[in-house]
Image (cartoon, rainbow, N blue to C red):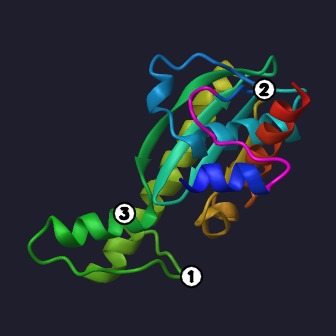
C-alpha cells in the first residue's frame, strides 16, 4: 500500500483517517461521513484566526459552509452545489438549456438564455453566500469569514459581506493537523 511506503520513507507522515487526532472538537453527528477537506479547512481557519468564531465558505465543486467557535468547537456546516455543478445540472437535467461557463460580466437580469443562466446561477450563489453569512452573524455577530476553493477568487469581490480569501486554507489545515499529531 502507498501509505506503508510513504510512512517508511518520510520522517513525518500521517494517514488522515477517522483515528487522527484533531486540534478541534468535532460535534458532527456522523463524523465518519465528514469530508477530510471540510475538516482541514475548518482546522486551517481556526489556526489562522484562533481568537474568534469562524465561518469557512469553500467554493469548489460543492459549496461547503463550516462553523468553528473560538473555543475550537466545530459545530457543523452545510453543502450545496458549486458553480460548475449548477451549470452542468441545468444542461444535463433540462431538455434544451445549453452548457455555459462563468464569465466576468454577470448581468442582474439575463437578456438571452445564456445570460439568464449566468445571471441566475451566479447571482443565486452570491445571494446564497451573503444570506448565509448574514444568518450566521445573527448567532455569531463577530464571525470571521474565510472564502476558499477553486472559485473563491471569482466570488471574492462579488460578495457584499467582508471576507478573507485564503486559497490554501485546506493545505494550511492539513499542515496544522500533521503538526498537532507530531506534537502530541
Residue 152 appears in the figure: yes
Residue for badge 1: 104
Question: x and y percent of residue 139 in the render?
Answer: 65, 19
Question: x and y percent of residue 162 in the render?
Answer: 76, 49
Q: Are marks 3 and 1 in contact (CB under 8 Å)?
A: no
Query: Is residue 9 on the magenta stretch?
Result: no
Q: Quadrant of residue 120?
A: bottom left
**Element type at mark 1:** loop
Q: Is residue 101 left or right of residue 75?
A: left
Of labels 3 and 2, the one closer to you: 2
Of labels 3 and 1, the one closer to you: 3
Residue shown at the point (73%, 42%) measured from the top left: 145
Residue for badge 3: 85
Q: Are marks 3 and 2 in contact (CB under 8 Å)?
A: no
**Element type at mark 2:** loop
Query: Is residue 12 on the magenta stretch?
Result: yes
Nearer-the-camera pick, 7 or 160 = 7
> Rounded to the nearest whole Å, what is the CA distance between mark 3 and mark 2?
32 Å
Nearer-the-camera pick, 159 or 44 = 44
Of labels 1 and 2, the one closer to you: 2
Q: Is residue 91 left or right of residue 61?
A: left
Reply above or below: 46 against 173: above
Residue for badge 2: 23
Residue shown at the point (59%, 46%) measured from the top left: 37
Provide the residue span drawn in magenta. 10-19
Q: Are marks 1 and 2 in contact (CB under 8 Å)?
A: no
In primary-sequence order, the first of circles 3 and 1 is 3
Amino acid at each position: 500500500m502507498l501509505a506503508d511506503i510513504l510512512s517508511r520513507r518520510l520522517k513525518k507522515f500521517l494517514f488522515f483517517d477517522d483515528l487522527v487526532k484533531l486540534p478541534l472538537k468535532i460535534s458532527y453527528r456522523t463524523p465518519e461521513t465528514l469530508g477530510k477537506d471540510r475538516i482541514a479547512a475548518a482546522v486551517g481557519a481556526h489556526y489562522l484566526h484562533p481568537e474568534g468564531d469562524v465561518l469557512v465558505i469553500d467554493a469548489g465543486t460543492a459549496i461547503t459552509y463550516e462553523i468553528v467557535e473560538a473555543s475550537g468547537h466545530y459545530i457543523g456546516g452545510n453543502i450545496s452545489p458549486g458553480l460548475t455543478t449548477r451549470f452542468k445540472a441545468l444542461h444535463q437535467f433540462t431538455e434544451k438549456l445549453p452548457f455555459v461557463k462563468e464569465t466576468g460580466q454577470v448581468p442582474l437580469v439575463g437578456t438571452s438564455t445564456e445570460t439568464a443562466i449566468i445571471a441566475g446561477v451566479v447571482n443565486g450563489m452570491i445571494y446564497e453566500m451573503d444570506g448565509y453569512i448574514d444568518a450566521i452573524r445573527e448567532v455569531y455577530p463577530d464571525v470571521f469569514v474565510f472564502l476558499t476553493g477553486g472559485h473563491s477568487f471569482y466570488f471574492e469581490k462579488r460578495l457584499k459581506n467582508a471576507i478573507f480569501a485564503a486559497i490554501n486554507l485546506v493545505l494550511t489545515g492539513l499542515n496544522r493537523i500533521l503538526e498537532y499529531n507530531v506534537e502530541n
